[in-house]
Image: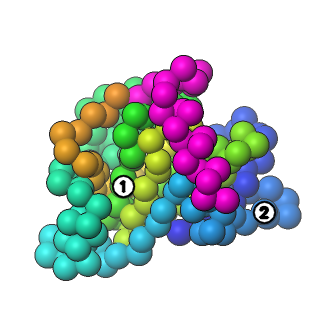
Amino acid sequence: MEAWYMDQSEEDQRLPHKLQPNKPVSLEELQKLGVFYWKLNADIHETDPELQKLRKEQGYSYMDIITIHRDALPNYEEKLKMFYEEHLHLDDEIRYILDGRAYFDVRDRDDRWIRISLGKGDLITLPAGIYHRFTLDHTNYTKAMRLFVGEPVWKAYNRPADHFDIRHKYDTDSSRAC
Ligand code: KMT
Ligand code: NI
């Protein structure tokens, strides 16, 4: 896991888009935005007691595995385009990278993009109501576990989606964490 502020360039979304000089973002800064991170052993994800403990404690009753690759995901191009539209969900987004690499971009409090680079063994939770987007990097492959509290709802609301109560809740919850 590594996070940084993005440059403004409209170039290829799969590039790192680091500022020059790089402006890294710490775990503490991410936590203040309501973003949490765990490092697990993806090789043993089927039996991992640490993952089981986390799922139990956090109530992550649902899980499935998505492979994002040209040959594995139906409507690959269309889905990647959707994932990179700035959006929010009414529930937390919980993703555990089992293989490959991926970028999650989240907005900070001043509406600047932070890019979070994830690899094998990285588990991240994005709070309900945070504006974010997702992309593959130049390796064009990731396999991720999707976790959810209860029955999954994948519905994404593209920005602007400020009329939802969850936006207000997100703002008040995460500013209290500061
Ligand atoms: C989302 O809603 O942003 C996604 O599901 C991203 C792809 S899952 C690795
Ligand atoms: Ni999302």
156 lies left or right of 49: right
28 or 65: which is nearer to us?
28
Q: Is residue 147 above or below residue 27?
A: above
Q: Which mark is residue 46?
A: none
Q: Is residue 70 above or below residue 42?
A: above
Amino acid type, callout 2? Lys
Secondary structure under badge 1? Answer: strand
Give the magenta part as a residue range.
Answer: 156-178
Q: Position of residue 90 (x, y in %)?
A: 40, 34
Where on the image, by quarter, is ligand 1? top left
Crowd around label 1: few <14 · some 14–19 · many ≥20 (10 Å):
many
How far is disc 2 from disc 1 in space, using C-alphas?
Answer: 24 Å
Q: Image quadrant of residue 31?
A: bottom right
Q: Position of residue 40 (x, y in %)?
A: 34, 76
Q: Is residue 26 above or below residue 143?
A: below
For the point 34% across and 46% down, the residue is: 68
106 or 167: which is nearer to us?
167
- Position of the C terminus, as image quadrant, is bottom right
Count how many numbered circles sit on residues in the image.
2
Amino acid type, callout 1? Arg
The residue under label 2 is: 23
- Does the segment drawn in magenta span residue 176? yes
Q: Position of residue 11 (x, y in %)?
A: 70, 39
For the point 19% across and 71% down, the residue is: 52
Secondary structure under badge 2? Answer: loop
Ligand 1 is within 8 Å of the C-beta of the residue at disc 1? yes
76 lies left or right of 65: right
- Does the segment drawn in magenta span residue 36? no
Q: Which mark is residue 95?
A: 1
